[in-house]
Image (cartoon, rainbow, N blue to C red):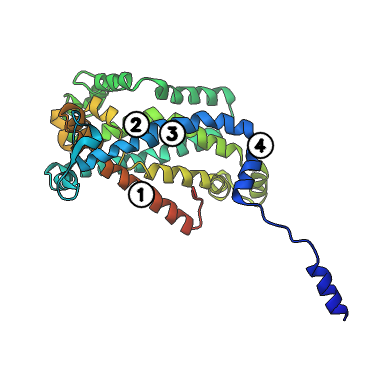
Amino acid sequence: MANTASSAAVNSKPQVLKESYGARCKKDFFINWKLYLIFLPILAFYIIFSYIPMYGAMIAFKNFSPQYGIWGSHWANFYGLEHFVDFFTSPDFGRILSNTLTISFSTLIFGFPAPIILALMLNEVKHSIFKRTIQTITYMPHFVSLVVVCGIIKNFVADTGLITSLLSSVGLVEKTDLLGKKELFVPIYVITGIWQEIGWGSIIYLAALSGINMDLYEAASIDGAGRWRQLFAVTLPGIMPTIVIMLILRVGHIMGVGFEKIILLYNPLTYETADVISSYVYRRGLMEFNFSYSSAVGLFNSVINYALIIFTNWFSRRAGESSIW
């Protein structure tokens, strides 16, 4: 009887109903409406410049003509896949894909660790004035216009340029325009990219380093760990989530080598190693007015980038590290 009475008492308690998702969102909106108001311009930016233009991707499956517009233009052959087939069977496909992957992986291998190394080195500097000076010097190239940067690069690697003169004096290169040599385009592109972005990229890692608990360093020091051992036991594990997130985002842009710097630096002598998908799209679309073909190439590029970021995030999550979602 006692058990029955206690069971009845438990069953008689009022049931707490879970709030619906819509109700939780409404409550959160009224509590944090100022934050949503701040976020509104960002949302509008992505809707206007990222989502609405996706409607125009339809021309990749049509023989687009400005005279008839997107809807009025006829569908391409092979169920709309004519331009994709033309691109995959083009003699340019293998060359520009190989160039894109070569430049992207070279930038990833050499360029991605560079800001991390700089941040770790600056983290060890105790002299504040010297540290701020180095930070300012390394930040500056990021804020210089890319056109100006490419002009500086061209002057430095010209046949009478500073870099060419230094390298030729030690017998590493001939005294000629280095950008005219196809085998040197990728090294020049990668090295100058590191020089331009190493300081700016180190900011996020310096911020992550500042969030590491100093008690961990004291405990490691008491255990007899030197600075080198503390680097691998405390510092790197402390910023590893940030490194993983940045790596995922970087892998998502492997196929997205920016065309601006490529176009400003390459020339017909270096097309063989410098021409990438983005510059190819620019040349075929805006210079040759082949809008449908260039849209198909650009859409292929975007799909590959999307697949890469999904796979990298999945792999990172399965490996037990941080992930974006």
Pointer 2 residue: 193
The numbered mark at residue 308 is: 1
> What type is the residue that disc 2 sits on?
Gly
Measured in 3D between alpha carbons, the distance from the residue under mark 3 to the one under mark 1, in whole angstroms, is 21 Å
116 and 284: which is toward the camera:
284
Q: Give the left or right position of residue 16, taking residue 58 as reference.
A: right
Pointer 3 residue: 46
Q: Residues within 10 Å of mark 1 (few under 14, many from 20)?
A: many
Pointer 4 residue: 30
Percent x, y of residue 154: 24, 21
> What type is the residue that disc 3 sits on?
Tyr
The structure residue drawn at horizontal position 41% and vertical position 31%, both measured from the top left corner, is: 48
**2 or 4: mark nearer the eye:** 4
Measured in 3D between alpha carbons, the distance from the residue under mark 3 to the one under mark 4, in whole angstroms, is 24 Å
Q: Is residue 103 visible?
A: no
First of labels 3, 4 by sequence position: 4
47 and 115: which is toward the camera:
47
- The residue tagged with tag 2: helix, strand or loop? helix
> What type is the residue that disc 1 sits on?
Leu
Mark 3–mark 2 CB contact (< 8 Å): no
**3 or 2: mark nearer the eye:** 3
- The residue tagged with tag 3: helix, strand or loop? helix
Q: Give the left or right position of residue 106, taking residue 208 as reference.
A: left
**3 or 1: mark nearer the eye:** 3
> What type is the residue that disc 4 sits on?
Phe
Percent x, y of residue 285: 20, 31
The structure residue drawn at horizontal position 48% and vertical position 45%, both measured from the top left corner, is: 245
- Image quadrant in which you'd find residue 179: top left
- Image quadrant in which you'd find residue 73: top left
